[in-house]
Amino acid sequence: MNDTILILGACGQIGTELTQKLRALYGRDNVIASDIREGNQEMMSSGPFEIIDATSKERIFEVVEKYKVTQVYLMVAMLSATAEKHPLKGWDLNMTSLLAVLELAREKHIQKVYWPSSMASFGPTSPKINTPQQTIMEPSTVYGISKVAGEHWCNYYHEKYGVDVRSIRYPGIISWKTLPGGGTTDYAVDIYFDAIKNGTYECFLSENTRLPMMYMDDAINATIQIMQADADKIKTRTSYNLAAISFTPKEIAAEIKKHIPEFEISYKPDFRQAIADSWPQIIDDSHARKDWGWQHKFDLTSMTNDIVTSLKALEKQKLEEV
Ligand code: AKB
């Protein structure tokens, strides 16, 4: 593989694990990680790293030129809950970074672009069960508005200028190596940490709020799979629906209880409840499965086994180091 990859937002929840996977696949020197600030020790020592403000097209271009970058993964975003608090900043970050990268691709400085959309691009008027690939999309959050607009920009640059841009609508992504920040689905990560540490968790969504979710390993595989697929397999140039599991806080708590019987959950819904209520509950991702062969591996049980085992091992290691 002769590709040189630049990851913008490499220190975020998905970027951190994506960087390590891409470095393993493409070679450390062929994957340039970047973010607005330096990352952890593993990030900084496992390959090249550049400080980049992703809203600066000039700075991205400088790094693209320096390393002769062929592909960009744009993982920078202000997520749903934070963007509701800073609407214009959220819009600016999410749109300016995307348009900067699409322009660089239009100018033929890069050959391929990955940009994530989200289930947040759906809204209260979209069907909630088996939400189709193409349906009503009237999001009620700033984040969702930026994602729908971004999807249309991707499609426009593809149709009008032939830009090879690929995109997935992520559900909530659950991980344990790097924490998410500012999302509505973050509860499904926080719950594992609090369960292991304190044996209790106060959930900011109500017990029966069903949302589409996915384990990080599946999300990383999907991301790389869509980027490696032959171009003629990518029939949707807005963004693909992607799904794995859907569950409620009550259901994830019951699964955690199988490992930590004394675990207790309580509920105190806040402003994020309205955001969650505007999103789908179960997503139909048959187009991704048919077009480029997407398949998920983890269900709620296998994901919980993996996370609880990993976090317990981490706790033990920390105690031994003390
Ligand atoms: C969020 O909760 O904002 C994100 C998302 C669903 O895109 N995790």
Image (cartoon, rainbow, N blue to C red):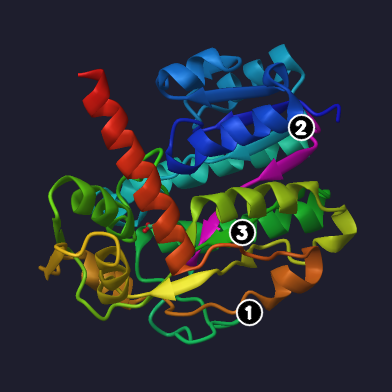
Q: Position of residue 21 (x, y in %)?
A: 63, 35
Label of residue 34 in the image: none
Gap between marks 3 and 2, in whole Å?
20 Å
Q: Residue at x 23, y 65 (%)?
A: 272
Q: Residue at x 18, y 65 (%)?
A: 271
Crowding at mark 3 (Cα within 10 Å: few <14, some 14-19, many 20+)? many
Q: Give the residue number, with chain letter if any, for mark 1.
A: 134
Relative image position of residue 210 (x, y in whole percent): 35, 78
User: Residue at label 3?
Assistant: 168
Query: Of the residues under marks 2 and 1, which one precedes in the sequence?
Result: 2
Q: Quadrant of the N terminus?
A: top right
**Residue kind at label 3, given as amino acid type:** Ile
Q: Earlier in the sequence, mark 3 or mark 1?
A: 1
Magenta residues (range): 108-120
Q: Magenta includes 118?
A: yes
Residue 206 vertical position relative to residue 186 in the rendered view, above or below:
below
Query: Could you tell me if residue 315 is visible in this image?
Result: yes
Q: Secondary structure at mark 2?
A: loop
For residue 110, the mark is 2
Locate ligand 1 by image quadrant: bottom left
Q: Are marks 3 and 2 in contact (CB under 8 Å)?
A: no
Q: What kind of element bears circle 3?
A: strand
Q: Please, what is the three-letter code of the amino acid marked with disc 2?
A: Ile
